[in-house]
Amino acid sequence: MEFWFLLILSLCLCAALKQIVDLVSHKKSNQTKLSLPPGPTKVPIIGSFLWLNGSSFSQIEQILCNLRHKYGPILTLHIGSRPSIFITNHSLAHQALIENGAIFADRPPAIPSFRIINSNQHNINSARYGPLWRLLRRNLTSEILHPSRVKSFARARKWVLEMLTERFKDHVESGEPVRVMDHFQYAMFCLLVFMCLGEKLDEKVIREIEETQRTMLVNGGKFRVFAFFGNLGKVIFSKRWQQLLEMRRRQESVLIPLIRARRERKEKKQENPDEFVVSYVDTLFDLQIPDEGGRNFSEEEMVTICSEFLNAGTDTTSTALQWIMANLVKHPEIQEKLYSEIEGFVSSGEEKIREEYLQKIPYLKAIVLEGLRRHPPGHFVLPHAVTEDIVLDGHVIPKNAAVNFLVAEMGWDPKVWEDPMEFRPERFLSDKGEVFDITGSREIKMMPFGAGRRICPGLGLALHHLEYFVANLVRDFKWTAVDGDDVDLSEKLEFTVVMKNPLRAHITPRVK
């Protein structure tokens, strides 16, 4: 006990001294005499303990909402050795991410545990604003997310949809309600694995990949302690550190053989060129990192990049899909209005909705946008960092600060949205035929995909997948609430913000 008391006391003193030194040096360098945005008084180390526990971290959104009323639309919390700035309203978000986009486009340095997970920031989400980030983002957007490439995966989407509907038909025959999230996650994961690795893998292999990905996501919160103790944390929490390393080794052992097999397949594609569809991993083999001597990515780094692709396209989309379907069950009149509009565009006898029809169904788009506004899968974007000291709203944001944006609160702002907690797709239907700008380039009203230079590059693909699956699921089945079971829209934080009580619904085949 004496050892641990002395250790914790030493850590507190070290942290206090470091914060005093940081404060003095900042005051000396800050010629404008401006201060950080306001916030609660910081207490060295103790003030950070809130963030060491996953269940406490889930309360941060409510804490920030309370602090916003006291301190204003931009505030500071001291988490670890660097201040964290939280921006809570639309106009300041636009000033930061759009008007000063280049300055706010960086990422904070990764903590030790995240350097293991993201290969020392060698993926799109975590890469610092520079040549590596530009290379990876340009490769993804031009090689995989380009409309022509997205179209090439149409058969994969049809395959996954048929698999999903067959699973739902089993519930129809049994009469049992369907718990949709398990099916949505597996279906989306199959689609993203195909887009990433270019192969229709056996269910056993897909489940194995899914298990390694899910383990990393679910356990991510417990490694947050390494943000506060640095390398010393590896000693204090040695078992936890070893657990992280083992999880990473497991992930590599599953994905690296598949990456190697795909490399061999790519080299032999001349044998059956018509059967070869370019996948994401195919585009990584010949990429060269410009600021690291032009070297190629290692297999371990490819695991990180592929893992990012799978996570980004699976959990967020399946979560959003469940929220949308839950609201269509809760509001049957909206579901029937959508069904009627779909039938007006689809010829009788057609088994599936052609993808080109999706652009012609405005109510479908409105429902998807309203789902993302009311239930954004992530209530925060990934933390930004500024490339230089900058003044925003009369306060200085220092170069080393992490900058966060309250996504959900912006989409629920009663000053912008009438009755914001109501699910009302009609708010996105314009009499003038105007298309809602979800990128926020003109004005930020909601930002489920972020905004500015770090906006999610998969925005278009995610919208397309949501529209495709919602349209077909509503056309194929009538979705109704389980008797005596009102649809509960309570939330719970996991990797994304999911339904606390997952959706269960009865489904009835539609007569075509």
Image (cartoon, helix red, strand yellow):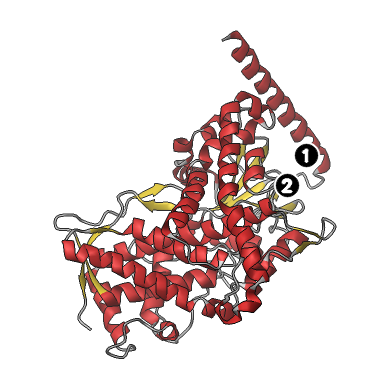
Any part of residue 339 in sight: yes
Instruction: Please determine whether, in this image, residue 79 is positioned above or below residue 303.
Output: above
Question: Which element carries disc 1, helix, strand or loop?
Answer: helix
The answer for how far apart the CA atoms under marks 1 and 2 are is 9 Å
Whichever of callouts 1 and 2 sits on the residue coming sooner in the sequence is: 1
Instruction: Please determine whether, in this image, residue 197 is positioned above or below residue 395.
Output: below
Q: Nearer the viewer, residue 437 or 454?
A: 454
- Residue at the extreme left: 483
Q: Answer left or right for 374 relative to 152.
A: left
Q: Quadrant of residue 163?
A: bottom left
Residue at figure coordinates x 47%, y 51% from the top left: 208
Any part of residue 414 in sight: no
Report if the CB atoms under discs 1 and 2 are less than 8 Å apart: yes
The amino acid pointed to by label 2 is: Pro
Question: Which element carries disc 2, helix, strand or loop?
Answer: loop
Where residue 211 sits: x, y (%)?
A: 46, 48
The amino acid pointed to by label 1 is: His
Where residue 449 sits: x, y (%)?
A: 53, 63
Residue at figure coordinates x 56%, y 64% from the top left: 197
Q: Nearer the viewer, residue 202 or 31?
A: 202
| Residue at numbered disc 2 | 398
- Which corner quadrant holds the N terminus? top right
Q: Quadrant of residue 377?
A: bottom left
- Which corner quadrant holds the C terminus? bottom left
Q: Answer left or right for 429 relative to 327.
A: right
Residue at figure coordinates x 75%, y 54% from the top left: 387
The label on residue 26 is: 1
Where residue 288 sits: x, y (%)?
A: 77, 63
Q: Quadrant of residue 444?
A: bottom right
